[in-house]
Image: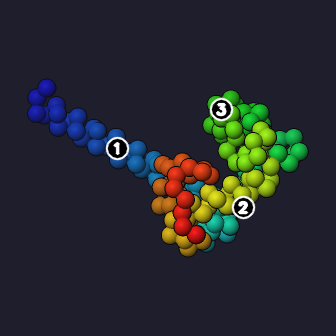
Amino acid sequence: MNKQEWLWLAVIGAVSMASATALARTYTSIFFESLDADADGIVTTVEFEDHAMARWAESDLDHDGKVTAAELHSIDGGTGFHGSEFVRLPGDADGDGAVSEAEAQAEAHLLSTRLDTDDDDALSEQELENGRHVHMRAGDGPPREP
């Protein structure tokens, strides 16, 4: 491969990386806007937790106050995207195979606390972006100082 071919490969690689970064930022921006319930440009931890609880309520298909792997499986079309491939559901603190409203609230609060790395009770786009790349579930990673 000659010098010009190497240069083109480098340019194509750089453009591809820039496109992937732009796409990820676009996703984060869209997610940020969807969380900002009052459209004030600030996503508070309360807004984040309220959004999480609304998603939990939507996932409780049989309205029994619990979300099971089967319910998640039917929502995501069997892809496992929502965590249905796990033996223990994310947030299932008591291991009964379902996430209750109280467990969901505790998980949402823990996640918002871990995402809010500057402890200002709000989530920036950067904090959300960083959270996309780190598995921030309960018990994962080092505990944060209170």
Residues at marks 2 and 3, CA–CA distance in whole angstroms: 25 Å
Residues at marks 2 and 1, CA–CA distance in whole angstroms: 34 Å
Query: What amino acid is at disc 1?
Result: Met
Q: Nearer the viewer, mark 3 or mark 1?
A: 3
Q: Quadrant of the image for the C terminus?
A: bottom right
Residue 107: percent from the left, percent from the top? 68, 54
**Marker disc for residue 17:** 1
Q: Quadrant of the image for the N terminus?
A: top left
**Category of crowding for the residue at label 2, using alpha-carbon neighbours closer than 10 angstroms: few (below 14), some (14–19), many (at least 20):** some
Query: What amino acid is at disc 2?
Result: Asp
> Along the horizontal axis of the image, is 72 left or right of 32?
right
Q: Residue furthest left?
A: 3
Residue in the image at 74% along x and 36% along y? 69
Q: Which residue is mark 2?
A: 50
| Depth order, front residue of 44/113 | 113
**Marker disc for residue 76:** none
Residues at circles 2 and 1 in contact by the CB criterion of under 8 Å: no
Query: Which secondary structure, mark 1?
Result: helix
Residue 82 in view, yes or no: yes
Coloration of the structure image = rainbow
